[in-house]
Image: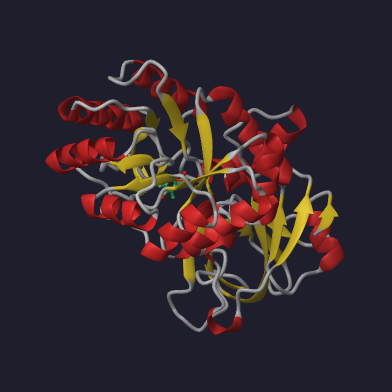
């Protein structure tokens, strides 16, 4: 990947016709450093948020050693890069062949599950292994999350109690509980409620618990979504965890995805045509802009016009992506200079999580070019030097 000082410099030099992913490994490292220093437990990076090798490399260099994987290909990706990494297969429903390969080929010893059927599958496919850590996924409220994940997975009530007992009987190694409060969770109290629900079930089951995994869901900043400081989330988790009915040396885990990578990538798109307030751009819902189009999230934007010129006042725009599908549209509104038009570029920020990770090749699009830049994010959840903070406050107002 070529290096540039900033997204602006990259555009000036490359004048890209395909979307440009401007990647900032220093921001992944800053977020990882914050979590490693602040969280009193292990950080498992949720690989699905952004599986790019430069992301995994930056996390590893900063000291992240545990990875939450959810497919056999994610197991392979991480194991090939880091032979000594700890893999945790946190998808509660796994293909039998995936279980077998994760265990025998990639050395995965930690498996999540939310049913007794899955417990049996794991025991079958590992040949009745005795070195397994089981993490029972509980279903908890996602009321405070911007993207809800509660419908699909998680055991509740008596079902959870039975599963905790059976999983306890099936291993001499660690038994844990996990949950996911939903992605982009805006309220620290969601973890308090979830941990209390977990405590109730642990007491009812009467089992010894060695791991409490508080999942992902830690928020990032987007226009219109300004979460409280990250420290409050961590403080709340520490406070409630300390009072849980678990062993003295019970481990605490978290699986952040979004929070570690959201700030680190922006996508630079080119305007191919303007019709009124609609900008036809070269990236969209089948490329790097899934959440902007399908979920209607607003991302911070800035025009890049290499020849410069007088800045015009701002106006609201919406985007159409490059494919022929009419769902390939983002209503925004995105605030950009009123005179923007064909041939201008737009930097769309905060797309490091669930951006490039979700791009497809539909309709012949989906190609992008990766570069590395040293500049600041559009907004940040983490403390940063003053020089960087100046740009952040400029964009945070949106
Ligand atoms: C997606 C996912 C994560 C990461 O969630 P974020 O909202 O990106 O932090 C963590 N754990 C599990 C089990 C997941 O499915």
Q: Is residue 37 above or below residue 359?
A: above
State the colouring used for the structure image: secondary structure
Q: Position of residue 306 (x, y in %)?
A: 82, 62
Quarter holding residue 3:
bottom right
Q: Position of residue 215 (x, y in %)?
A: 41, 39
Q: Say whether residue 20 is left or right of residue 365.
A: right
Q: Is residue 393 visible?
A: no
Q: Position of residue 368 (x, y in %)?
A: 68, 69
Q: How many marks?
A: 0
Q: Is residue 57 visible?
A: yes
Quarter holding residue 375:
top right
Q: Is residue 103 above or below residue 169?
A: below
Q: Pick the residue in front: 260 or 61.
A: 61
Q: Quadrant of the N terminus?
A: bottom right
Q: Is residue 329 above or below residue 177?
A: below
Residue at left 71%, top 56%? Answer: 22
Quarter holding residue 322:
bottom right
Direction left: furthest residue: 158
Q: Say whether residue 26 is left or right of residue 56.
A: right
Q: Pick the residue in front: 284 or 253.
A: 253
Q: Position of residue 213 (x, y in %)?
A: 40, 34
Residue at left 42%, top 40%? Answer: 131
């Amino acid at each position: 990947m070529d290096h540039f000082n900033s997204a602006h410099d990259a555009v000036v030099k490359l004048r890209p016709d395909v979307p440009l992913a401007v990647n900032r490994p220093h921001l992944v490292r800053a977020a990882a450093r914050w979590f490693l220093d602040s969280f009193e437990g292990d950080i498992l990076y949720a690989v699905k948020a952004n599986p790019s090798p430069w992301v995994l490399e930056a996390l590893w260099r900063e000291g992240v050693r545990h990875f939450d994987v959810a497919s056999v290909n994610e197991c392979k990706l991480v194991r090939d890069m880091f032979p000594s990494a700890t893999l945790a297969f946190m998808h509660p429903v796994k293909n039998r062949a995936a279980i077998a390969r994760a265990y025998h080929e990639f050395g995965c010893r930690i498996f999540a599950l939310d049913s007794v059927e899955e417990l049996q599958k794991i025991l079958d496919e590992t040949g009745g292994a005795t070195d397994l850590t089981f993490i029972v996924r509980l279903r908890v409220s996602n009321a405070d999350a911007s993207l809800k994940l509660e419908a699909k997975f998680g055991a509740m009530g008596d079902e959870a109690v039975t599963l905790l007992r059976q999983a306890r009987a099936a291993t001499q190694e660690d038994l844990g509980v996990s949950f996911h409060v939903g992605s982009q969770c805006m309220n620290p109290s969601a973890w308090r409620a979830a941990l209390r629900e977990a405590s109730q079930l642990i007491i009812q089951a009467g089992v010894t618990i060695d791991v409490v995994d508080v999942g992902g869901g830690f928020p990032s900043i987007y226009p219109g979504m300004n979460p409280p400081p990250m420290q409050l989330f961590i403080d709340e988790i520490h406070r409630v965890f300390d009072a849980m009915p678990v062993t003295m040396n019970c481990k605490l885990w978290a699986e952040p995805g979004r929070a570690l990578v959201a700030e680190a990538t922006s996508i630079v798109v080119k305007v191919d045509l303007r019709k009124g307030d609609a900008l036809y751009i070269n990236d969209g819902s089948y490329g790097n802009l899934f959440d902007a189009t399908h979920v209607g999230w607003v991302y911070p934007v800035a025009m890049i016009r290499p020849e410069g010129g007088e800045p015009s006042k701002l106006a609201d725009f919406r985007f159409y992506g490059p494919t022929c599908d009419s769902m390939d549209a983002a209503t925004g509104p995105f605030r950009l200079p009123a005179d923007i038009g064909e041939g201008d570029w737009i930097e769309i920020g905060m797309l490091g999580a669930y951006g490039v990770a979700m791009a497809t090749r539909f309709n012949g699009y989906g190609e992008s070019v990766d570069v590395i830049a040293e500049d600041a994010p559009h907004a940040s959840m983490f403390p940063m030097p003053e020089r960087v903070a100046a740009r952040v406050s400029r964009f945070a107002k949106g």
